[in-house]
Amino acid sequence: MKYLKWLNLIPLIMFFIVDKLRGTLISRYLLIIIVVLGVINMLIAKGVKEYCISSLMLVVSTAAGMILYTYYYYYFVSAGPETPIFGAAIMMVYGFIALAVAAVGTVVVVIKDKKDGKQ
């Protein structure tokens, strides 16, 4: 159970995998993976502190994965001037989704903790 929080590092490599398999970066599967990881964090968290650390890991790995993918694409695939702008826009979309999932999960974990009488 304690290693489940390391699943939050999946977004570091998922952009490369989906691009190689599907040929596109905008995919509903990536959004589903981020939402599922957020729900898993919510279910396995023993407290608000643990949940916030796991959610922060998910958000940071999503942003870092997109930055790494944009860097790779710009320097090794296409050095077009629009590549960094497009990468930043896609990173904001996935980052906002991850932040929204983290915010909703934080509310749920706080309510769950209050109901259990931990605070």
Image (cartoon, helix red, strand yellow):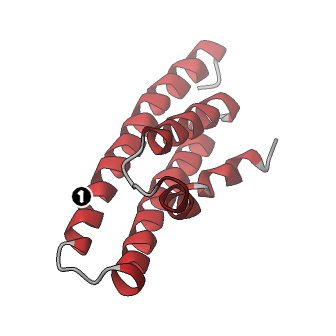
In the image, what residue occupies the spot 74% across and 45% down? 4
Does residue 70 sit above or below 48 in this rendering?
Answer: below
List x then y, in percent, for residue 5: 68, 48
- Residue 69 horizontal side relative to residue 14, left or right: left
Give amino acid for label 1: Ala
The image quarter containing residue 89 is bottom left
Screen quadrant of the N terminus: top right
Other residues around mark 1 within 10 Å, as few (<14) / some (14–19) / many (≥20):
few
Does residue 70 sit above or below 27 in this rendering?
Answer: below
In the image, what residue occupies the spot 52% across and 51% down? 58
Q: Is 43 or 48 nearer to us in this picture?
A: 43
List x then y, in percent, for residue 119: 59, 26
Does residue 6 sit above or below 106 in this rendering?
Answer: below
Q: Indicate the secondary structure of the residue bearing disc 1.
A: helix
Does residue 70 sit above or below 2 in this rendering?
Answer: below
In the image, what residue occupies the spot 39% across and 76% down? 73
Residue tagged 1: 89
